[in-house]
Amino acid sequence: MYICKRINLFFNSQNPITGGILKMAKTKNLLFVLLAALMMTGSVVITGCSSGPSEEQMQQLNDLKAEVESLSSQVSSKNDEKSSLQRQIADKDSKIKQYMNDMDAVKKRCP
């Protein structure tokens, strides 16, 4: 009985020497458990995110690429059309200017 009391007293958390040891052991255990949980969670996240794109995602990507090409060609054709219309406007402006000059010349000749 005396030995059991001494052992209990030795491992009592109020004992200044062994109480600190027990607290450190509890802290180490808690840290170990948290680290293990973090590692498991991290492995789940890493393996869940490392898979490649699905077939449906690849099809969507290919569709979007085709749409981009189509829109780019439309932009190019519209730019060509715009420059053609600008040339036509410039030609008509020059013709109008020429007609105005001709009209001024005719007005000067006529009394």
Image (cartoon, rainbow, N blue to C red):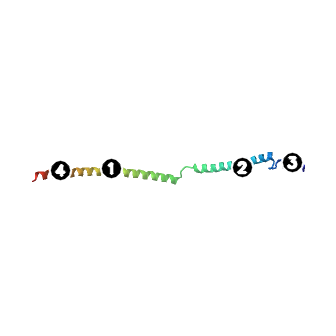
Proximity of marks 1 and 4: CB atoms separated by less than 8 Å: no
Give the foreground label among 1 and 3. 3
Give the foreground label among 1 and 4. 4
Q: Amino acid at mark 3?
A: Arg
Q: Which residue is mark 2?
A: 30
Q: Which residue is mark 3?
A: 6
Q: Which residue is mark 4?
A: 101
Work out whether mark 1 precedes mark 4 in sequence or the reverse, and give the earlier one. Answer: 1
What residue is shown at x 67% (from left), y 50% (from top)? 37
Work out whether mark 1 precedes mark 2 in sequence or the reverse, and give the earlier one. Answer: 2
How far is disc 1 from disc 3 in space, using C-alphas? 99 Å
Q: Which residue is mark 1?
A: 80
Q: Residue 80: x and y, percent?
A: 33, 50
What residue is shown at x 73% (from left), y 48% (from top)? 27
Q: Secondary structure at mark 2?
A: helix
**Residue farthest along the left direction in this orientation:** 111
